[in-house]
Image (cartoon, helix red, strand yellow):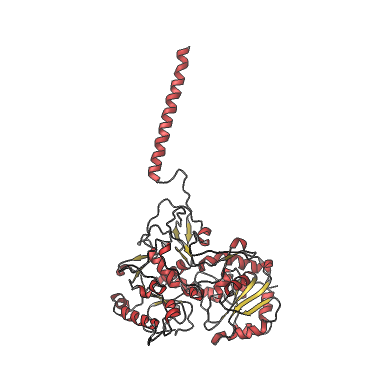
Amino acid sequence: MLEKSRIPSKFFFYLITISVFLLISSSVFLLQFSNTSFAPAVFKLVVLNGTYFEPLVKSRDKNLPSFSSEVPRVDAKGSTKRCELGCQVSNSSKKLGFLEKKKMVACDSTQALLRVFMYELPPEFHFGLLGWKGKENQTWPNVKNLSLIPAYPGGLNLQHSIEYWLTLDLLSSSIPTVVRPCTVVRVHNSSQADVIFVPFFASLSYNRHSKLRGNEEVSVNKKLQGKLVQYLMGRDEWKRKGGKDHLLVAHHPNSMLDARKKLGSAMFVLADFGRYSAEIANLEKDIIAPYRHLVMTVQSSKSPSFNERPILLYFRGAIYRKDGGMVRKKLFYLLKDEKDVNFTFGSVQGQGINKASQGMASSKFCLNLAGDTPSSNRLFDAIASHCVPVIISDEIELPFEDVLDYSQFCIFVRSSYACKKGYLLNLLRGIKQETWTKMWERLKEVVHHFGYQYPSQPGDAVDMIWQAVSHKKSSTQFKFHSRQFKFHRKKRYDRSTSGIRTK
């Protein structure tokens, strides 16, 4: 009886031993195969305009550079939390659900939507304008390390910083440790490129160096433009297509004033067409890019609702402007005494930006009026504040209008109607709370399309600009997006199709 009872015990002992051995062996194999921790990785697939990405951030990698162009964010109570250039993860990356990636690889140029060749211009044309000085024969800063990237100057300079973010994005496109969408990649052979990018910080050059200093007879800004024209005209890449495949950023309305006619065959990234002739700049070839907003970004989860915004209509800025900006003066005298309207003179000096941030976040509607040019950063300040924009600028061109229906989150009013006594306020006071709330919700959905950051994220302003460029380069896509643009543009003033319902 004793002998019979030992047999099952040995059997179970051997069975358990073999099972443990197999379990350990399989675990080791899995670890070697996946090169991950015991915790299984979770991946989220994001679909963006028909292109599939796995936008994953390696959050524990302290060497991963990540900063945003965001200014302080404001919650419903008006308290601020500053998001400096060293932000670990931007709002949009959190919203899109970036998770830990087990292994980061560089973008495949054959799979990218757009392949871009970038000229190796001397630093005096780009980061040198920021005071950056690299080592001998060093053209670009080290974009792997955040602390080595020169910061862009603040204030009004920031609103036209578009070339800065695009250049950083191209520089990082071949660095595996920088996680970004593979919409665009930099190639080092111009014959393989769809587009030739000219890294000239034209807006900064105008803002910082357009005035004569000391004994100068010609400003630094003019000298740089002259050098750039001479350089491009001598390049085989320019001669090949007459510059039609070149991309230049001239976002400030006064940037590239001396060179724009000579380089007019190229694609421009602009704020609007206000100071350009139709032959030099037009929607057939050029890109309208959003301003970098200056006010605080309202957190979506704490964005004040309809009843939490006591101000009906808000405007703060220069009142007396020329050209199309005459509407500001007329509206000021029509609205200045209305109790639920805040229409005041203001600038960025002192606490101007903070006051505008608080004002917009407390308002249901925010005026975007034509000034010296059809556009201003005020529209994008309003979007960042989730304050429904009221656009009174008949000649305005809007970024990405081929893919965004602005009538879903903006109200358009023709200048001639706006200047009629009582018209504007009757329109706004007649808009139902339900209608306003739908536009407010849509603002929270689209706000990330107007944000600049590094590294870029799917659907942010940098990514959207590159996609807009790709639409110009494909005849099929151009026709489709041209139709979409016309469709959306037609809805600007059509109350029946824009969804605006009044009481």
Residue occupying image coordinates x 38% and y 81% = 220
Q: Is residue 500 left or right of residue 461?
A: right
Between 333 and 125, the one lying in front of the other is: 125
466 w.r.t. 9: above or below: below
Across and down, in percent, residue 432 comes to 68, 70
Find residue 345 and report its horizontal and vertical position in percent: 61, 81
Q: How many marks?
A: 0
Work out whether residue 497 can be spotted.
Answer: no
Residue drawn at x 47%, y 44% as measured from the top left = 39
Which corner quadrant of the image does residue 329 belong to? bottom right
Q: Is residue 441 visible?
A: yes
In the figure, is residue 443 to the left or right of 54?
Answer: right
Residue at the top extreme, as displayed: 1
**Which residue is situated farthest in the front direction here?**
214
Q: Nearer the viewer, residue 188 or 49?
A: 188
Write the residue at 38% across / 73% down. Answer: 128
Q: Quadrant of residue 228?
A: bottom left
User: From what the image shows, is residue 139 above or below residue 376?
Assistant: above
Is the C terminus in the top left, top right, bottom left or bottom right quadrant? Answer: bottom right
276 or 172: nearer the eye?
172
In the rendering, at what x and y percent does residue 229 appear? 34, 81
Q: Is residue 134 left or right of residue 433?
A: left
- In this view, the residue in front, 305 or 297, is 297
**Percent coordinates x, y for residue 146 in the rendering:** 43, 62
